[in-house]
Image: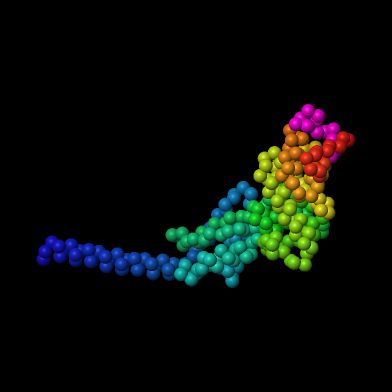
Amino acid sequence: MSVKMKYIIGYSVLALYVFITAGFVAKKSAEEVCRKVEVSLNDTVNQLVVPRDITKLMEDKKNSVYGHRFSNINKMQIAKLITNNIALVKNVGVYRATDGTICINIEQRKPILRVINKYNQSYYVDTEGYLIPLSDHWSARVLVANGDIAEKSQKNRAIHIDSLNTNIEIKQRETLRELIILAKHINDDEFLNAQIEQIYVNRNEYEMIPKVGSHIIYFGPIDNYVDKFFNLKAIYYKGFANLGWRKYKAINLKYQNQVICTKR
């Protein structure tokens, strides 16, 4: 037998061995059952959701994956189950580990605003415009909005502002949109985020309450809001630096290119 023929036979036997072994491993892997569920969170400090929320859902008889073959476990269905039942979850990643474990990665929603409506009901609004319920585990330190806000949230559901009940007044929906715009601007500005803690909706206008001081900021309607915030920062940095903000009870930004401060 030639050397070349020996190589051909040797490689053929090796290829057959690899093929048979791979098939055996794949079959064994498919027959392996889930013994454990591990949950990890993208934010371990601000926990709107805790791992137990997920594992408890997965332990329910109709949802349980424990003891099921991995070949029968649908990862997409697991992700959908979690997002449909836990409104504070934004995205879910599901994969299988090598030791019989299903690993679930949770991305939480990020609140930017806490709304207290005129019925004294509370909910968050996240960065994408979804109305989401409060968490049982953690209270987000975000801007608070109250006053003339009628919209309610749905328990255990995340509802986008564009999907709200069409029966509510158009102005109420616009109010929420405007609050999101204001909240995003405040959150993105280090000074404003440190200074403003509350927005009060007074019909078609907005009033703001600072964290420091006992004055009120009469912001007016949302028109020219970027300029209004610029003027507000200017009066804090320049005007109050010399005069002192304790002497004033109100800052009025309603009028274009004007800041009117009222003394006590």
- Residue 36, image x, y percentages: 51, 61
* Magenta residues, start to end: 238-251
Which one is nearer the viewer's eye here, 134 or 239?
A: 239
Which one is nearer the viewer's eye here, 232 or 122?
A: 232
Which one is nearer the viewer's eye here, 208 or 2?
A: 208
Q: Is residue 35 visible?
A: yes
State the quadrant of the C terminus. top right
Q: Is residue 50 visible?
A: no
Which quadrant would residue 133 be assigned to in this image?
Answer: bottom right
User: Would you say 175 lies left or right of 94 here?
Assistant: right
User: Would you say 42 lies left or right of 174 here?
Assistant: left
Q: Which residue is depicted at the point 79% across and 45% down?
A: 219
Q: Which residue is depicted at the point 15% across and 62% down?
A: 4
- Residue 122, image x, y percentages: 76, 56
State the quadrant of the N terminus. bottom left
Q: Which residue is depicted at the point 74% across and 35% down?
A: 234
Magenta stretch prevailing secondary structure: helix
Question: Where 27 sits versus 224, above or below?
Answer: below
Question: Where 117 sits versus 167, above or below?
Answer: above
